[in-house]
Image (cartoon, helix red, strand yellow):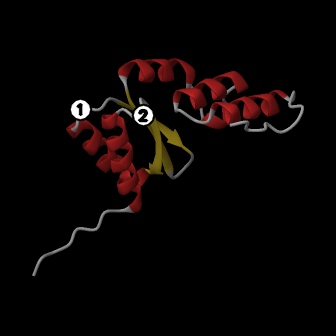
């Protein structure tokens, strides 16, 4: 009888992010997981030679940034405190680096600055 190894949903998400990184879909990833998975996440990244940065995210979670070294060097300069304490400018840069929708990032930035004049309309 074969034993089946079950993989947690968090680890499946991590493996998908790593796949996208290797395929060039992403240059950098922000992966948030429960701290109990931290050692497993680090082991997976190190086994594949992927550089990373760890940052506590509250009591139970861990933010794991990984990807291109030049992106991580910028993260070390920008993300020096919890994400909810970033300035609107730092938040915008982080979102752009992570490949988030740029119009949504612009709208988020304007709202955080208190200068939003309406809802962004996506004109495709």
Q: Residue at x 72, y 29 (%)?
A: 106
In this view, which residue lies farthest toward the bottom?
Answer: 1
Question: Residue 81: x percent and y percent?
Answer: 59, 29
State left or right for residue 92 relative to residue 36: right
Q: CA distance from mark 2 to mark 1?
A: 16 Å
Q: In which quadrant is the C terminus drawn?
A: top right
In this view, which residue lies farthest toward the front?
Answer: 124
Query: Which of the two residues, 57 or 16, is positioned nearer the viewer here?
Result: 16
Q: Which of the numbered marks, if any, corresponds to residue 34? A: none
Question: Based on the displayed image, in which of its 4 quarters is residue 94 positioned?
Answer: top right
Q: Residue at x 36, y 21 (%)?
A: 69
Query: Which of the two residues, 38 or 113, is positioned nearer the viewer here?
Result: 113
The residue labelled by disc 1 is 49
Q: Is residue 14 above or below residue 51?
A: below
10 Å crowding of disc 1: few (<14), some (14-19), many (20+): few
Question: Residue 71: x percent and y percent?
Answer: 44, 22
Q: Is residue 20 above or below residue 117?
A: below
The residue labelled by disc 2 is 26
Q: Residue at x 80, y 28 (%)?
A: 110
Q: Is the residue under label 1 in contact with that under label 2 (CB below 8 Å)?
A: no
Q: Is residue 95 above or below residue 56?
A: above
Sequence-wise, which precedes: disc 2 or disc 1? 2
Question: Residue 72: x percent and y percent?
Answer: 43, 23
Q: Residue at x 41, y 29 (%)?
A: 27
What kind of element bears circle 2?
A: loop
- The nearer-to-camera label among 2 and 1 is 2
State left or right for residue 67 relative to residue 106: left
In this view, which residue lies farthest toward the left?
Answer: 1
Question: Based on the displayed image, in which of its 4 quarters is residue 29 positioned?
Answer: top left
């Amino acid at each position: 009888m074969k034993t089946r190894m079950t993989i947690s949903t968090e680890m499946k998400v991590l493996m998908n992010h790593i796949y996208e990184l290797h395929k060039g879909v992403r240059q950098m990833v922000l992966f948030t997981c429960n701290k109990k998975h931290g050692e497993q996440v680090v082991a997976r990244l190190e086994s594949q030679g992927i550089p990373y940065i760890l940052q506590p995210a509250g009591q139970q979670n861990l933010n794991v940034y990984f990807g291109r070294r030049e992106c991580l060097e910028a993260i070390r300069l920008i993300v020096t405190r919890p994400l909810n304490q970033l300035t609107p400018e730092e938040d915008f840069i982080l979102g752009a680096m992570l490949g988030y929708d740029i119009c949504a990032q612009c709208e988020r930035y304007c709202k955080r600055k208190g200068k939003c004049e309406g809802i962004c309309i996506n004109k495709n």
